[in-house]
Image: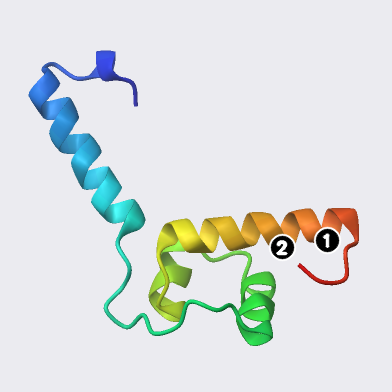
Amino acid sequence: MSRKNYKSDEKYRIAKALERIRYYTVPANAVSTIWSIEDDMFLLENNQLTAKELSELLGRSVKAIEHRRRKLRNCSIAKVALC
């Protein structure tokens, strides 16, 4: 939402802060930063799940899930063997 949809600047700042926390927070069960082939396959096979649901299942942030999905999608479009 844009800033003009909020009645006050304070409410806008609070909403944006909560959004950032929700978007970038790494789940408590996060352990690894390297994507395995199994993780990639899980992402591709479970495309119907939201990034938030996958975040909880894989133990990664929502931003990381979205970034990896985009990278896998671009690789498949370009037909690159390894990404």
Residue 81 position within the rendered picture, expressed as x and y whole percent measured from the top left: 88, 71
Residue 27 position within the rendered picture, expressed as x and y whole percent measured from the top left: 31, 73
- Residue drawn at x 35%, y 53% as measured from the top left: 23
* In the image, farthest residue toward the right: 79
- Residue drawn at x 55%, y 79% as measured from the top left: 34
Dividing the picture into quarters, in which one does residue 47 lie?
bottom right
Secondary structure at numbered mark 1:
helix
Secondary structure at numbered mark 2:
helix
**Mark pair 1, 2: CA separation:** 6 Å
Vertical comparison of 3 with 49: above or below: above
Dividing the picture into quarters, in which one does residue 67 lie?
bottom right
Vertical comparison of 55 with 22: above or below: below
Q: Which mark is residue 72?
A: 2
Residue 64 position within the rendered picture, expressed as x and y whole percent measured from the top left: 49, 62
Tell me the kind of residue under disc 1: Ser
Q: Is residue 50 visible?
A: no
Q: Which mark is residue 28?
A: none
Tell me the kind of residue under disc 2: Leu
Q: Which mark is residue 76?
A: 1
